[in-house]
Image: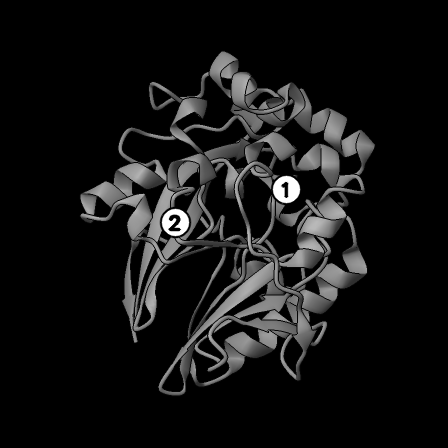
């Protein structure tokens, strides 16, 4: 099994986002107006899995239109995102980093993708969907879709970035695996499993890629770096802190498993683009 770790842009956010206090309305207001000099840069990762049953892309990163010149462009970002989301994230995508550009470098066209798996519907995970919407299957857990359309996430996850694309929305099923014991087994052989890791959003999925007894865990935004589970620091950006803690405890247990080849977080600055083979 081969996993390409692809960085598809960056966010510049307040330092409390990965390791801070609860993200409430007061914190949101502070972060929307935070000066750029007071922000930190975090990567936005996606993952391309070369699996015996096809090419699988996990998340899509930012789209090129959000950063036409490869730098933060407030006007361009606000043309794609709600203004408050652009102000919150200060997104940018260096040249060559958008997902379709990186796939092209690998000799892959969007229609060559067998699956696009969306861990959740936050803007930095789905904005690039416009570049890969010709994939054979786009998969999103039904539970994530349900809450996004009905709650506070409706503002946080603007529908015009994703709702027009045809998606398969399987339900989680009961399983011994995961903090919530909910799993989607993509192929029915446990080689690719979407595991519910609630807290950042209710329906968020981590992805377990398993081969020959070894596995890699893609933790999505349940953690921003190993520091979160090693020091039991709940990320600031989330809306259900008890569930966030529960998900972190589960990730810590998975990371300690001797069969774990790697745990990767979507915004870990210590992770570098590359290839994992196992």
| Residue drawn 51% across the image and 12% down it | 75
- Residue placed most toward the observer, 234 or 102: 102
> Given the current orientation, which residue lies at the most extreme top position?
75
Say whether marks 2 and 1 touch (CB < 8 Å).
Answer: no
Place of residue 47 in the rendered image (x, y in percent of width and height, measured from the top left)? 39, 55
| Residue drawn 81% across the image and 42% down it | 151
Which mark identifies residue 17? 1
Place of residue 220 in the rendered image (x, y in percent of width and height, measured from the top left)? 54, 56
Residue 103 in view (yes/no): yes
Disc nearest the viewer among 2 and 1: 2
First along the sequence among labels 2 and 1: 1
Q: Quadrant of residue 10?
A: top left
Place of residue 158 in the rendered image (x, y in percent of width and height, measured from the top left)? 65, 32
Residue 143 sits above or below residue 41 on the image: below
| Residue drawn 45% across the image and 43% down it | 44
Specify whether 119 is left or right of 271.
Answer: right
Specify whether 162 is left or right of 32.
Answer: left
Q: Quadrant of residue 251?
A: bottom right
Place of residue 260 in the rendered image (x, y in percent of width and height, measured from the top left)? 44, 78
- Residue placed most toward the observer, 168 or 227: 168
């Amino acid at each position: 099994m081969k996993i390409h770790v692809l960085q598809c842009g960056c966010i510049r956010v307040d330092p409390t986002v990965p390791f801070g206090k609860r993200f409430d309305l007061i914190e949101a207001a502070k972060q929307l107006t935070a000066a750029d000099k007071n922000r930190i840069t975090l990567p936005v990762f996606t993952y391309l899995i070369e699996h015996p049953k096809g090419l699988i892309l996990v998340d899509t990163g930012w789209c090129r239109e959000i950063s036409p010149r490869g730098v933060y462009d407030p006007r361009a970002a606000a043309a794609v995102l709600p203004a408050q989301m652009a102000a919150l994230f200060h997104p940018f995508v260096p040249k060559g980093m958008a997902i379709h550009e990186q796939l092209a470098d690998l000799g892959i066209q969007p229609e060559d993708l067998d699956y696009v798996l969306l861990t959740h519907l936050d803007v930095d995970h789905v904005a690039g969907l416009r570049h890969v919407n010709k994939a054979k299957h786009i998969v999103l857990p039904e539970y994530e879709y349900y809450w996004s359309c009905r709650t506070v996430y409706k503002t946080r996850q603007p529908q015009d970035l994703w709702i027009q694309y045809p998606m398969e929305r399987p339900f989680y099923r009961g399983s011994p695996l995961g903090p919530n014991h909910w799993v989607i087994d993509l192929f029915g052989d446990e080689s690719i499993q979407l595991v519910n890791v609630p807290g950042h959003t209710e329906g968020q999925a981590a992805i377990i890629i398993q081969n020959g007894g070894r596995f890699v865990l893609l933790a999505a935004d349940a953690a921003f770096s190993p520091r979160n589970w090693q020091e039991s620091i709940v990320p600031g950006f989330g809306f259900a802190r008890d569930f966030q803690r529960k998900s972190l405890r589960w990730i810590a247990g998975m990371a300690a498993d001797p069969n774990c080849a790697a745990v990767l977080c979507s915004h870990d600055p210590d992770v570098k683009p590359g290839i994992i083979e196992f």
